[in-house]
Every structure is written in C-alpha cells, then in structure tokens.
Image (cartoon, rainbow, N blue to C red):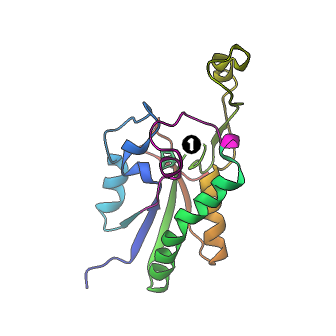
Amino acid sequence: MNRSRKIVVLCHCLLNSNVKVHPLATYPGALTQIWTRFASVGVGLFQLPCPETSFLGLSRWGMTSEQYDCPAFHRHCRRILEPCMDQLVALYRDGCALVGLIGVDGSPNCGMFRTCTGYRGGEISSESTDVSGQVGMLSSVSSRGIFMREVLAMLEERNISIPLLAVDEEAPDNLKTS
Ligand code: SF4
C-alpha cells in the first residue's frame, strides 16, 4: 500500500492560476513552490473550488472583502464547499492527516491572515463614483477572507482541526503561519 495518508488542502488558484482576476496571475499554471514542496514528499494535494469564478466568472472585477460579504455569497461558499467537506471527512476518518490548509494572503476570499478592504463599488461610468479614487482606498488588513471564514467554520462544525498556512505571492518560497 503506497498511499501516504497525508493531505494538504489548497486554494484553487495555487494549482490553477487561470481562475484569477485578470491580470493578476504571477505564474502560468500551478505554483511550482507548492507543487515541489508537497507533492515531492508524497503529500496529496486537495484543491478547493474557486468561489469567485463560480459566482461571477472570469470577467469579474477585482473586489474587496466587504463587497463579497453578503448572505448570497456566503451561501454560495457553503454550497460549493459541501462536497469538499464530504470528501475531507471521508479522508479524515480513513486516517489521513490534514497537514495544512493554504490560503492566499491578500485575497478578499482566500486570505488566511490578511485580506483586502476599501472599495465602495458603484457605476464605473459615473463621475460621482470616482473609481480611480477608490483605488487609493484599497488597503490590506489583518483578517480572513470571506471564503476562508466559511471553510474554517465548516471544518470546525465537523470537529476537524488543521494547521493554517498562507502563500504570499510576492514571496512564495516561504509559507506564512500567522
Ligand atoms: S477566490 Fe481564491 S481560489 Fe479564486 S482566484 Fe481568488 S484566491 Fe484564488
């Protein structure tokens, strides 16, 4: 029996950058540092779904966490996570160790230790909206993204604990732990 019974749980774009808001991808497909770090030592890669792509598609704008913080989007996160949780529970009961849950810091949804805030939204062609002024309101804050909050809540509801990690794409060689 060759299976390692070790799994790392990853945000979707760490293995497929094509889901990112245009033009944010900094690597062409999978993030090599993640692939080599875990797959090379026999850890299975469990890829979570991308909540933004399944909610708004690939012509979506870049948004901030409070813009996603509405009941329908929280329900969407839970809906797409249900089958993932079923699989994780099955793996957990089969003796698999969940060695980490890796977020993407800075993301409004997958930020583990940092997320982004500040946009008010509005009609982009309206002068009163001042879209360029909103860019200056964008800030990085110590908080979790919306999707990550739901991931952690659903794991807790199932009594599954897991070490928390995050990729900072500006320094992807080191995984953050806080
Ligand atoms: S929502 Fe998450 S998985 Fe989707 S592109 Fe953003 S960080 Fe990646």
Three-letter code, disc 1:
Ser
Tag count in the figure? 1
Residue 62: x and y in percent read 55, 34
Side (left or right) of 84 relative to 113:
left
Q: Residues within 10 Å of mark 1 (few under 14, many from 20)?
A: many
Asked whether 66 falls inside the magenta stretch, the response is yes
Residue 6: x and y in percent read 40, 73
Look at 70% across and 48% down and name the residue there.
69
Q: Is residue 120 above or below residue 14?
A: above
Judging depth in this view, the residue of 106 and 20 nearest the camera is: 20
Look at 66% across and 25% down and name the residue there.
123
Which quarter of the rendered picture does the N terminus lie within?
bottom left
Side (left or right) of 115 relative to 81:
right
Residue 38: x and y in percent read 36, 60
Residue 22: x and y in percent read 44, 32
Side (left or right) of 172 relative to 79:
left
Asked whether 63 falls inside the magenta stretch, the response is yes
Look at 31% across and 44% down and name the residue there.
29
Judged from the image, the secondary structure of the residue bearing numbered disc 1 is: loop
Identify residue for label 1: 107
View extreme (left): residue: 1
Q: Is residue 73 above or below residue 89?
A: above
Q: What's drawn in magenta, residue-wise?
A: 47-67
Judging depth in this view, the residue of 17 and 39 nearest the camera is: 17
Look at 30% across and 79% down and name the residue there.
3
Callout 1: CB less than 8 Å from ligand 1: yes
